[in-house]
Amino acid sequence: MRHFLQKLRFWLPPPLILVLFLIADALTASPGFTFGAVNIVISVLLASVSVAAILHTAWQMRMQRTTLNPLHAEKSTTLVVGGCYAWSRNPIYLGMSGLQLAFALFIGSPAGVVAVPLFMLAVARLHIDFEEEQLRKHFGQEWERYEQRVRRWL
């Protein structure tokens, strides 16, 4: 099973998983599930915070000159532990989850709202588990101290 998941993660990178969930959200949209301006305001705020977390995290990694590619965590040169990484070991994936929820609320997809934990589970099993294993091997005790201090988002 593990070998299958390792192969599957290359076919389903996190952005593609997000796009597939957004398409499913759009296909299950129900106009009766929207609440006018309330949906818009909540969705825009949630999407804004999510995009800000993703961009800030990407900027942090770029400034530390380490890889952003989740398929090659072993190429990390620095263990980034500040900024968004001080409160979540997976701020980009957390931001992606926020985007999926914001989109589901915006278009009125009750199935999309309920599917957010499924998105999180798919990303955790296909990517986070493997990434953290690579980081543990690469950074050893430094990773273990960070792992004890900062919670995983799922």
Image (spheres, helix red, strand yellow):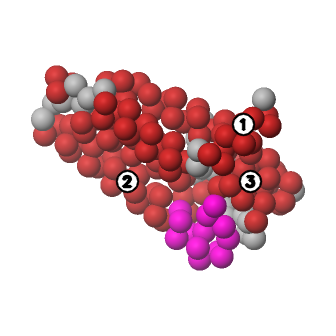
Structural distance between the alpha carbons of marks 2 and 3? 24 Å
Determine crowd level at label 2: few under 14, some 14-19, many 20+ residues with C-alpha closer than 10 A.
some
Closer-to-camera residue (51/18) = 18
Q: Is residue 43 left or right of residue 83?
A: left
- Rounded to the nearest whole Å, what is the CA distance between mark 1 and mark 3? 26 Å
Along the line of sight, which residue is nearer the eye, 115 or 8? 8
The tag earlier along the polypeptide, 1 or 3, is: 1
Is 109 rendered above or below residue 61?
A: above
> For mark 1, what is the residue?
5
Q: Residue at x 12, y 35 (%)?
A: 36
- Residue at image location 59% in from the left, 44% down from the top: 12
The percent position of residue 77, horizontal first and vertical second, equals 75, 70
Image quadrant containing the N terminus: top right
Q: Is residue 144 left or right of residue 32?
A: right
SS type, badge 2: helix
Q: Kindly state the secondary structure of the residue where label 1 is placed.
A: helix
Q: Residue at x 31, y 30 (%)?
A: 27
Q: Mark 1 touching mark 2, by CB under 8 A?
A: no
Identify which amino acid the numbered label 2 is placed on.
Answer: Val
User: Which of 11/34 is in front?
Assistant: 11
| Residue 70: quarter of image | bottom right
Disc on the earlier residue, 2 or 3: 2
Q: Is residue 53 visible?
A: yes
Q: What's under tag 1, amino acid-wise? A: Leu
Is residue 131 on the magenta stretch? Answer: no
Residue wearing tag 3 = 146
Which residue is under mark 2?
49
Q: CA distance from mark 1 to mark 2?
A: 31 Å
Number of other residues with Cα within 10 Å of mark 1, as a class: few under 14, some 14 to 19, many 20 or more: some
